[in-house]
Image (cartoon, grey):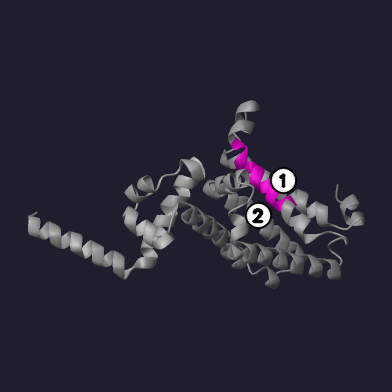
Amino acid sequence: MTAKSNASSSSSTRRGRKNDPESVQADILAVATREFSEKGLSGARIDEIAEKTRASKRMIYYYFKDKETLYLHTLEAAYQKVRLQEAELQLNHLAPLEALSRLVRFTFCHHAKNPDFIRLVMIENIHHGRYLAQSKLIQSLNAGVIDALTNVYNRGVEEGCFREGLDPRELHWLISALSFFNVSNQHTFSRIFDWKQAAPENQRKLEDHVTDMVMRYVLPDDTAMANP
């Protein structure tokens, strides 16, 4: 390839980047997700992120200002992804028991398939949620999942299939905690107890167990006693 053709190719690449800023930003966020989840906010480097993307260091700063802002956008993108997928479950169109079961299984499987998300949440907890608190988008997204779960729970109470007196936020905590631990402590738990937790057959059993525990938790007391 001649110098002229090299220059032409480079020019075309730059034009492509300028003409598709959304694609460039999505590429930056995808790489940043991996870097932040593996190395944390302090360990990740803009130079390394730039090397692994189709963007220059200068372009990253143009779109995201600084490393802290890029980290915040990475958090927002991670939460937005899971919340958008939850919305696609169309829980309002399902009977309460089916809706809750679908949400539990989705949460368990999403977390298992997206360990980067779990690590990002763990890292943000190291920072005491300081960056998350700056994002109105994340607060709005998470309020939406509580609203959806509240709707499912209230319908279940009205139909007599859920017991009264539960707080949907606590129910969401329970679902998240069980699904989160499956990923966050997978390696230590597997080594300590010499158990292949990540094996597909074990993951299927754990998904069933988590779903069963949550469903039993919301059942009316007399129903739960009748189904030990």
Near-viewer residue (202 or 120): 120
Secondary structure of the residue carrying numbered label 2: helix
Location of residue 116 in the rendering, given as x and y in whole percent from the top left corner: 52, 47
Q: Position of residue 99 (x, y in %)?
A: 71, 64
Checking the image for residue 192, the label placed there is none
Residue 141 visible in the displayed image: yes
| Residue furthest out toward the right | 222
**Label whose residue precedes the other's in the sequence (1 or 2):** 2
Q: Which mark is residue 209?
A: 1
Span colored in magenta: 174-186
Give the label on residue 105, or none: 2
The residues tagged by marks 1 and 2 sit, at their Cα atoms, a distance apart of 10 Å
Q: Inspect the magenta stretch and tell me whether residue 52 lies in it.
A: no
* Left or right position of 194 against 62: right
Determine whether 131 is above or below 20 in the image. above
Which amino acid, mark 1?
His
**Which residue is located at x 51 percent, y 59 percent?**
77
Vertical placement of residue 82 versus 186, above or below: below
Residue 170 position in % (x across, y down): 78, 55
